[in-house]
Amino acid sequence: MTHLHVAAVLLAAGRSTRMGAQERKPFLELCGESVLSRCLRVFASCEAVDELVVVCADADRERASELSRPFGAQVVVGGAERTDSVRLGVGEVSPEARVILVHDAARPLVRAEQIEEVARVAADRGAALLAVPVRDTIKTSREGLQVSGTLDRELLWAAQTPQGFDAQRLRRVLARAHRDQFTPTDDAALFERYEGPVTLVEGDADNIKLTVPADLVLGEAILRAREEGRR
């Protein structure tokens, strides 16, 4: 694609209460390297990405800054909700940016080519997100005891990150969401509500989000398989 100024905002401010570890999620290690460093490394390797912003918890600012320095990333303290953290991170992005990518640092196994494709599609269509078709049959339950319905799996996609947006339009929807106190758990939901459809970019199952301790074991297995050329 014709080169555009692309900025990536990496969210490393999330809670890690389900990981069962004293260490906060961005500083857990995968095969000897911190989760945050791995995430920064893959984004820094992308030719399309011109600047990096890391959003972290206030208590983590010093450590996050130390890890971010080799990659030239700016560091900013996040807010109470995800949307607040995105807004604060986007606020540090230079005015030259044409596309802004938002990515969960808890997904350190994303591939460079996936990042590049989301940036390309976002530049062309206004918004894009990495996602995978749902493979399981999904049941609904109103009270958590009995099945109340079955969803059509053919219509379902599991959202991943990065999610990419036209920079001006993202700034606009973040401002509107702040005024409306709209705080979804997914950044594409902001665009869907205020701007319009978001284009799907098919990802893969390797781009896992580190949520529970078993994910660290799976993540290391994926990395070893990649090193051995099996994935």
Image (cartoon, grey):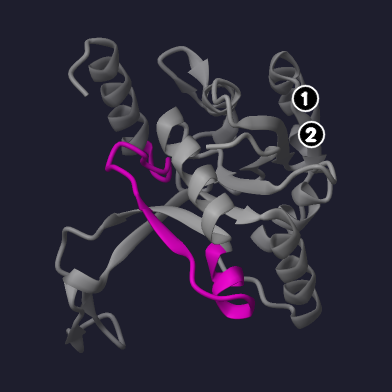
Residue 61's spot in the image, x, y percent?
A: 79, 32
Q: Nearer the viewer, residue 229 or 125?
A: 125
Tell me which numbered mark, 1 or 2, is placed earlier along the sequence. 1
Q: Secondary structure at mark 1?
A: helix
Residue 118 horizontal side relative to residue 190, left or right: left
In this rendering, the answer to whether 40 lies above or below 100 is above
Which kind of residue does numbered mark 1 sit on? Ser
Q: Total marks drawn?
A: 2
Q: Residue at label 1?
A: 65
Q: Can I make out residue 20 in this image?
A: no
Residue 7's spot in the image, x, y percent?
A: 69, 39
Q: Residue at label 2?
A: 75
Measure the C-alpha gap from mark 1 to mark 2: 6 Å
Residue 104 horizontal side relative to residue 57, left or right: left
In this rendering, the answer to whether 207 lies above or below 198 is above
Question: What residue is at 79 percent from the left and 31 percent from the top?
Answer: 74
Q: Can I make out residue 66 in this image?
A: yes
Residue 65's spot in the image, x, y percent?
A: 77, 24
Badge 2 crowding class, 10 Å Cα cut-off, few under 14, some 14 to 19, many 20 or more, is many
Residue 134's spot in the image, x, y percent?
A: 23, 60
Badge 1 crowding class, 10 Å Cα cut-off, few under 14, some 14 to 19, many 20 or more, is some
User: Mark 1 near mark 2, Cβ–Cβ under 8 Å?
Assistant: yes
Residue 37 horizontal side relative to residue 90, left or right: left
Q: Which residues are magenta?
A: 188-213
- The quarter in which the C terminus is drawn is top left
Residue 179 horizontal side relative to residue 155, left or right: right
Q: Nearer the viewer, residue 20 or 103?
A: 103
In this rendering, the answer to whether 13 lies above or below 63 is below
Q: Quadrant of residue 168?
A: bottom right
Q: Quadrant of residue 144?
A: bottom left
Which kind of residue does numbered mark 2 sit on? Val
Point out the residue furthest to the front here: 2
